[in-house]
Image (cartoon, rainbow, N blue to C red):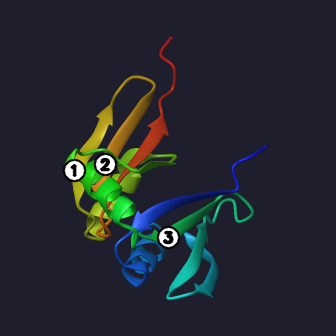
Amino acid sequence: MKIIVTSIFVEDQDKALEFYTKKLEFQLKHDVPAGEYRWIALVSPEDQDGTELILEPNNHPAAKEYQKKLFTDGIPVTMFGVENINEEYERLTNLGVQFKMKPTDVGQVTIAIFNDTCGNLIQIAQQNNPKN
């Protein structure tokens, strides 16, 4: 068994698609009508056949409440891995991405948290080299 799809609730699919492709540089794999919304699937450019990230509309009251509570409590909805967190932090900051936490070493990883402008906090993480 393997993970093939994961999703993030978003307030606006068009705004989310713009942010996740233009700023985070994910690639669009599917954009298919699904009733009044769309099935929007993104993939990492480094693994185009890997896990798909679905930009899920938060139209259900439970989804809205879940998303709002996580955001208010400062809890990221997901984590993306990066090779160099300081370079990624600089790149995203230069694109206007608002960080809630600058790169912070927390032991085996260094993390940073930003606002995706679509109702979510997202964490990026870099594995730290073990200290000998």
Query: What residue is drawn where x is 60% and y is 83%?
Result: 31
**Is residue 100 depicted above or below 19 in this figure?**
above
Q: Amino acid at mark 1?
A: Lys
- The residue beneath circle 2 is 113
The image position of residue 21, as x and y in percent, is 48, 75
Q: Secondary structure at mark 1?
A: strand
**Is residue 94 depicted above or below 102 in this figure?**
below
Query: What residue is drawn where x is 70% and y is 65%?
Result: 48
- Label 2 – label 3 distance at C-alpha: 19 Å
Horizontal side, residue 86 vs residue 24: left or right: left
- The residue beneath circle 1 is 100
Q: Secondary structure at mark 2?
A: strand
- The residue beneath circle 3 is 55
**Is residue 115 depicted above or below 78 in this figure?**
below
State which quarter of the image contains the N terminus. Answer: top right
Other-residue count near label 2 (Cα within 10 Å), few / some / many at <14 / 14–19 / ≥20:
many
Q: Amino acid at mark 3?
A: Leu
Q: Amino acid at mark 2?
A: Ile
- Label 3 – label 1 distance at C-alpha: 22 Å
